[in-house]
Amino acid sequence: MAEEMSNIAAFRSEAPRLRDADIPLPYAQWTDENLMLEHGRGTEAAFEELVRRFHRSVFNYIYRMVQNRHVGEELTQEVFMALVKNGDRYTPTAKFSTYLYTIASNIVYKEWARQKRRPKMFSLSWWSNDHDGEGESPIDTIRDESACVLTAFKRGEISEAVNEALHKIAPHYRESFVLKRFQGLSYEEIAEITDCPIGTVKSRIARAEQALRPFLEKYREYV
């Protein structure tokens, strides 16, 4: 009997401790929307977590639209500065990512208006949604394993073909295409960002792909 009680006591002492309900979750476990609300209350750590989550993807999106690394970095800073300025006015009526890319889209269009030119080129990995690789260049990236057998000449040839094809696509087609294929957003999110019906978004993406495919067919196994 004494031995059984000793075993029970030992079992109880090894029971896992439950989390205190009063201890808040670390910001890494918060939703994007709640982080933005907390940032609006003046919590810097919440804003820093949002930057950690979205800085890379926002930069990749903007870079593909303006095709200039320095300008892309500056515009990315503008996006997050807009979050700072609008923090206390934010209301979670849509996904935070939709809200964020709407800001980024508006800033890109303002940049195009300033420069009075259209973007020149996107990444070669136009069939892929994997855009968060550590340390990789946001342009001229070929993610297929067969890329290792490509020579520098072949890379240049593909790059030239992609440039030539994408020059034929209007900016509003390009934007919907990039948001879908590179950023992995849903049609619903893109519709909110571009302020267009879902049917229009789908049509723009289809038109972009249709325009690209004939020019890149010979490189289909690489891009």
Image (tube, helix red, strand yellow):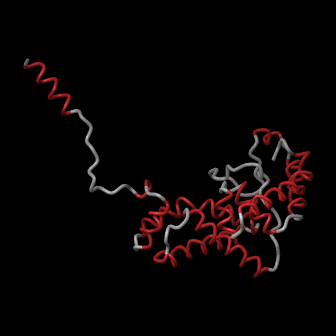
Q: Which of these two is toward me, 38 or 201?
A: 201
99 lies left or right of 178: left
Residue 80 found in image quarter: bottom right
Q: Residue furthest bottom?
A: 114
For residue 3, above or below residue 12: above
Residue 72 placed where, x, y %? 69, 69
**Residue in the picture at 60% in, 72% down:** 79
**Residue in the picture at 44% in, 68% down:** 37
For residue 223, above or below residue 104: above
165 lies left or right of 131: right
Residue 113 found in image quarter: bottom right
Q: Can you say which quadrant of the picture contains the N terminus?
A: top left
Q: Residue furthest left?
A: 2
65 lies left or right of 29: right
Q: How many marks?
A: 0
**Residue in the picture at 69% in, 50% down:** 129
**Residue in the picture at 29% in, 47% down:** 19
Residue 109 placed where, x, y %? 73, 75
Q: Which of these two is toward me, 208 or 4?
A: 208
154 lies left or right of 37: right
Residue 192 placed where, x, y %? 65, 66
